[in-house]
Amino acid sequence: MEKRKLKYNSLSEEGYSDKIGVKWLKSLAKKEFSKSKNLMTVFEFKRTSLWWWMEMWLYFSYAYQDSFRDIIRTLWAANNMIEKENPDKITFIDDGRIKNKVFDLLTDNKKIKKKKIKSFSKFTYIVEKKLKIFLIKRFFYIRTILRKTLLNIILKKSGNKKQKYKENVLFISKHSHRTEEFLNPVVDKLKDLKYNKVFLDTVTNEILLDTKMFRKKLEQEDSRHILIDNYISIKDIKEIRRITKRFKRLWNLLRKNKEFKSIFEFKKINIWELVEPQMSCFFYVRMKSYIEEFVAIENVIEEINPKVVVNLAAQGFDVGLLSSCIKRKIPSVIFLFGVVVDLSTHRDLDQVSQKEIKPDKFLIPTKTVVRGQNYKNALIKYGHYPEDSVKVTGDLRYDFLANKKFDKNKICRELGLNPKNKIILFGTYDAPLIRDRELLTKIVGESVSKIKDAQLLIKPHPNEKKEFYENIIKKYKLNAVVVEGNIFPFLYICDVLLMANSTIGLEAAILKKPFINMAFICNLDMWNYVKKGLALEAKQAKNLTNVIKKALYDEKIKKQLAKNRNKYVKEQCYKIDGKSSQRIADVIKSIINKR
């Protein structure tokens, strides 16, 4: 376009924030249709509602269809562009992707002439989607069978047999190395607790099977380990099939209901045809696994009958877990150490419940443990959590930093780096599309190469493989070193961190490192790093080198970033004093002592 001297603009999300999308989704859930039903009450399940699983999945999940978040963001940007440019005609490639589906809808709505250029990529895109859904659906089933079979063999050999327990504390953790960061420090502080410690091992999408890790878990003293997979009987399977069929029939009826479809409006535009694939995908692909988790966790609570349940991170089956606990008056503790997104915090006052189970009630635990005061403030102000139900403890994952010493010269020597030269660390962004990850890595590598004596370290996201980035380095002949493992040694030796919408920004701030949010790849500042003034922002790829230089050499900017950084860390993590795990253990002990 530049060569032909044509005027052009990219879609701009200026003025958009996640609050807009979340507010729309919240209002959508309350809109009434047939016989005064709404999205919360129509999908009633065992006194609660499927909606409490659906809303987060519909809004964020991009694995299958376009997420509600992407739909609303794209519609916002496209609508603003049309209103600004006021075109007589819009030409776009009909490739089946969200941007083009949005323009197709908007041109009809606004009665603008359009020309759709047919593309073979639409066929490949649709086939790719259907194949992906088919394979993932089968993967869940195969994974469950393999996991259950193999890990039960290990359980049997270990002598960790199924039995009835008395006086128990139930810990729930995903089958993941990352969850161990939460689990072990707290359990160590509860060694003097005069109760059996029962650990429920649950499924995670991060790994398929890790028998070595599971064996290590079984070696823990004074504990029993159980698998959630073992708590669904043949009778349960038949009941789950019956329930899923009932909800699918209901969904198929609603899809034909004009009154129901009419509630899906955004900016006075009905977007039913955009959101329908994602909603259908929930009922046809994901719903069954959520119902299975609900049934399984109910069976676990029934058998174990714990004094208290400790969930090490908010998970999909929290609806079933809290429902089971509330029915039996069992107190619960949930760690909420990830981002407190708007979907988790924004609840109506009459919607939050610790005792009453109804479809329009969002169930919350007896105690919610958060790492910083800002999280507590958000839960109380926007989520209407009772003030005494939220406890600030700091983040136990960072306890080791209180006394940890790193040797920069040694780390650099092991990586083949010069400790005297500037080190740029790139914390990768696991974008949905592989080509986006590759393009971002190429941009970063070429940008850093323009800075004299700068060295690039690439730390893949935990969901990614080191080999993937090593191949990109070879392909584009980039001068970089790919590392894996704990990120803190690499943050310690770096001079600047490059990231896109990631929690590692907080970890960089804890280690007093400046960092840059690459907004050109992910135009989100969910953690408010840029807004709070502790990070710089690169809005365009071509400006990345200049922004890195500012973070490296501009003393005034560095001083201001440091000032804002210290304030932010205190708000987010309370104290980096090595005592967070003890404070969490004290919360659990206090609940038990009150029973």
Image (cartoon, rainbow, N blue to C red):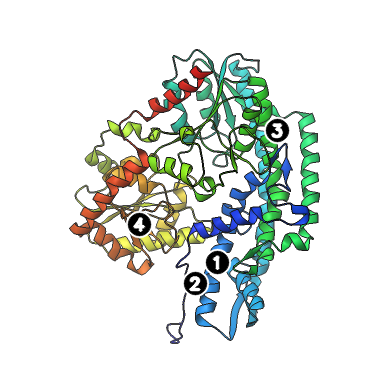
> Do tag 2 and tag 1 residues touch (Cβ < 8 Å)?
yes
Please report whichever mark, 4 or 1, sits nearer to the chain's N-terminal start: 1
Of the 4 image quadrants, the one containing the C terminus is top right
Q: Identify which amino acid the numbered label 4 is placed on.
A: Val
Q: Identify which amino acid the numbered label 1 is placed on.
A: Thr
Q: Position of residue 255 (x, y in %)?
A: 76, 58
* Neighbours of disc 2 within 10 Å: few (<14), some (14-19), many (20+): some
Compute the Cα span from label 3 to label 1: 37 Å
Please report whichever mark, 2 or 1, sits nearer to the chain's N-terminal start: 2
> Do tag 3 and tag 1 residues touch (Cβ < 8 Å)?
no
Q: Is residue 586 above or below residue 132?
A: above
Compute the Cα span from label 2 to label 1: 8 Å
Label 2: which secondary element: loop
Please report whichever mark, 3 or 2, sits nearer to the chain's N-terminal start: 2
* Neighbours of disc 4 within 10 Å: few (<14), some (14-19), many (20+): some
Q: Is residue 190 visible?
A: yes
Q: Position of residue 178 (x, y in %)?
A: 47, 36
Label 1: which secondary element: helix
Residue 193 or 365: which is nearer the viewer?
Answer: 365
Q: Identify which amino acid the numbered label 3 is placed on.
A: Val
Which residue has dot 1 on it? 74
Which residue has dot 4 on it? 530
Which residue has dot 2 on it? 11
Residue 10 or 155: which is nearer the viewer?
Answer: 10
* Neighbours of disc 1 within 10 Å: few (<14), some (14-19), many (20+): many
Q: Which mark is residue 295?
A: 3
Side of 251 relative to 312 (left or right): right
Q: Position of residue 478 (x, y in %)?
A: 36, 59
